[in-house]
Image: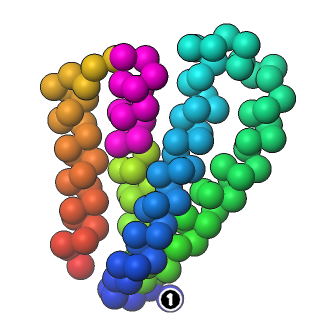
Amino acid sequence: MLTNELNYKFILMGAFLFIFAQGGAWLQHNLQFKYPKLGPEWWGWYVASIPITWLFLKSTQLGVHGFGGSVWANRFLGFSVGIIVYGFLTQWFFDQPITPKVMVQILLAVCIMGVQFIWK
């Protein structure tokens, strides 16, 4: 059942788990370019997929509950967190700077979340 009530405790817990889930997915997809031995053939990624999947499932469950049953609002939370995590990890591991274009895109992701919290 969809309500307009927000439960910030569940939203924050979901966002926290999304950070780890998105970070794990980023590592799983991109470390192969920095460390070629960690390509798709490396079995560790398949083992890592189990806790990463659990993190995504649990963060989705908490977020949907926190947004009063809204699957859309939670999807935007996961997307926005993912964009921020992706920007940070790409700069950290690959020294690819956050250009003005990337900064605008990160700010747009933050604005998307603002819409979820302000507009009811």
Label 1 environment density (alpha carbons within 10 Å; few <14, some 14–19, many ≥20): few
Q: Quadrant of residue 55?
A: bottom right
Quadrant where the C terminus lies? bottom left
Compared with 27, 9 (above or below) is: below
The span shown in magenta is 83-95
How far from the left and from the top, in percent, is residue 18? 50, 56
Q: In the current view of this chain or complex, which residue is farthest to the top? A: 36
Residue situated in front as seen by the camera: 65 or 51 = 51
Q: Residue at x 24, y 52 (%)?
A: 110
Q: Is residue 8 above or below residue 79?
A: below
- As helix, strand or loop, the secondary structure at mark 1 comes to loop
Judge from the rendering whether residue 47 lies leftward or rightward of residue 9; answer left or right: right
Give yes or no for residue 88 being in the magenta stretch: yes
Q: Which residue is mark 1?
A: 1
What's the residue type where badge 1 is placed? Answer: Met
**Left-right relation of 3 to 53:** left
Q: Is residue 110 above or below residue 116?
A: above
Q: Residue at x 41, y 41 (%)?
A: 85
- Residue drawn 40% across and 69% down? 12
Main secondary-structure element of the magenta-colored stretch = helix
Residue in the image at 61% along x and 66% along y: 58
Q: Is residue 108 visible from the viewing direction of this image?
A: yes
Does the magenta portion include 79? no
99 shown above or below 13: above
Residue 70 visible, this orientation = no
Q: Position of residue 92 (x, y in %)?
A: 40, 26
Q: Residue 88: x percent and y percent? A: 36, 34
Q: How many marks?
A: 1
Quarter assignment of residue 116: bottom left
Residue 38 position within the rendered picture, expressed as x and y whole percent measured from the top left: 71, 19
Q: Give the colour scheme of this rendering.
A: rainbow
